[in-house]
Amino acid sequence: MSADPHESAWYVQRAAQFSGGNEVQLLTGGDELFPAMHAAILRAHHDVWLATYIFHDDAAARTMADVLNLAARRGVRVRVVVDGWGTRSTLPTLRRWFEGSGVALAVFRPIDRWYAWLQPGQLRRMHQKVLAVDTEEAFVGGVNIIGDRVDLNHGITEAPRLDFAVGLRGPIVQPVAQTARAMWTRAAFGRDWREEVLALARSAEPLARARVLLRRLRLRTAPLEIDARDRQPVRAAFLVRDNLRQRRAIERSYLDALEGAKERFDLASPYFYPGTVFRRALKNAARRGVRVRLLLQGKLDYRFAGLAASVLYDELLKRGVHIYEYTPAFLHAKVALADGEWATVGSSNIDPLSLLLNLEANVVVRDADFSRALAAGFDQAIAVSREVTTSPLPRGWGSAMKRGFVAWAAHWYLRLAGITSKY
């Protein structure tokens, strides 16, 4: 593990710190992401760090657990941290899957007893989805460890949810790895020594099942393949939102891109309730002649989230912002594009939870080829979406009351979480 004092330089700066010489691959959903992650983990020599909001107990999650177990049995240091709320229902299963393999599991702010909610900061969750392998490869995005066709509230779906992630090589991997380690340290401080001692005391499990799994996965996975057009080094930056120095880093990056956009600004977010400054930036861009398109949920997983977005429709539509609702499946993508040279993929929604409370992680890429690839995926989603031309809420007192209720709920939720500044 590097002790270079400069490895934290990216974190102490409040603006995005871009590095050159990176390879970035756009991955759509778990169908593309998970095989690439499997391959990277199977190549690991030293350590694997995984942080995820949800680690489910379906087939895709079980395969991921098997791959992590296999790496740990080879002597790789494997550390997994999950959020105590997002993964609360599957923690017993995860502990059983990892038992005896050497994989160490930590829980960020567990909700295992009723009085856990009385502890300060419990409304602030770890929403990141990052994997770092040997400080050589990394993955960042919005995809949890759950199958694309499995929804926690609605069961099995016919169409996969829309989501994106990026595979990374180059200097940008260092801050990703540093962040994943920090999440582990924060969730499991003081436990590492105990895990190491217990690992020495355990008897080795039979590896027959692991060898079978390895043979099967070798047929299904391959090293991270970078498309020929993406092999040129690109400039990219890793951003986090935390409650220390990087409180507004992701939001600031969005605002800078909006203010600098000249032709187009596209944004996809399943949970959309931006604050006053963000809404003003969207409207100002549209007023300057920028084509501003928002891709939001058309198939709702939480009714309040849909209501929160819809109360803003009239305000945005009047100022020339185009709104689309994605209806073929659930939308989970958190991406944005500005003109043809700025793009971001990550875990951050555009709502108060992501922008003010949760721990988030995004990658910003300045590269025309990457932007074209993401723009193609965005345009495909727009083509099968429903354009909203009028507010779904009736005018009058009913609309005003709904908007007031959403604002009131957001206000008091933030107050409970300790946020007193204006949103």
Image (cartoon, grey):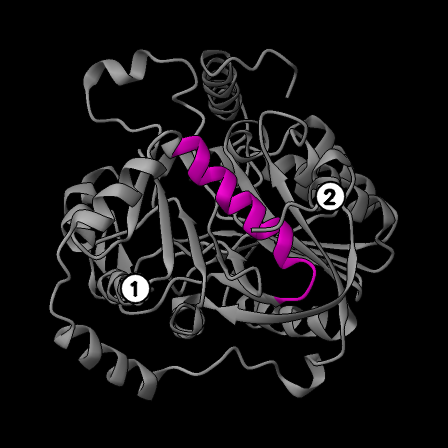
Which residue is the site of mark 2?
10
The residues colored magenta run 169-187
**Horizontal side, residue 107 vs residue 203: left or right:** right
- Classify mark 1: residues with Cα within 10 Å, few (<14), some (14-19) or many (20+): some
Point out the tag, 1 or 2, that comes first from the N-terminus. Answer: 2
Identify the residue at horizontal 80%, vertical 43% (top origin). Answer: 256
Taking depth in this image into account, of 333 and 69 the one nearest to the observer is 69
Q: Is residue 94 above or below residue 45?
A: above
Question: Picture coordinates of residue 76 (x, y %)?
Answer: 37, 61
Amino acid type, residue under disc 2 in the picture: Trp
Q: Is residue 297 above or below residue 246?
A: below
Identify the residue at horizontal 19%, vertical 20% (top origin). Answer: 113
Which part of the image, by quadrant, shows the C terminus?
top right
Question: Picture coordinates of residue 353 (x, y %)?
Answer: 50, 31
Residue 373: which disc?
none
Taking depth in this image into account, of 46 and 400 the one nearest to the observer is 46
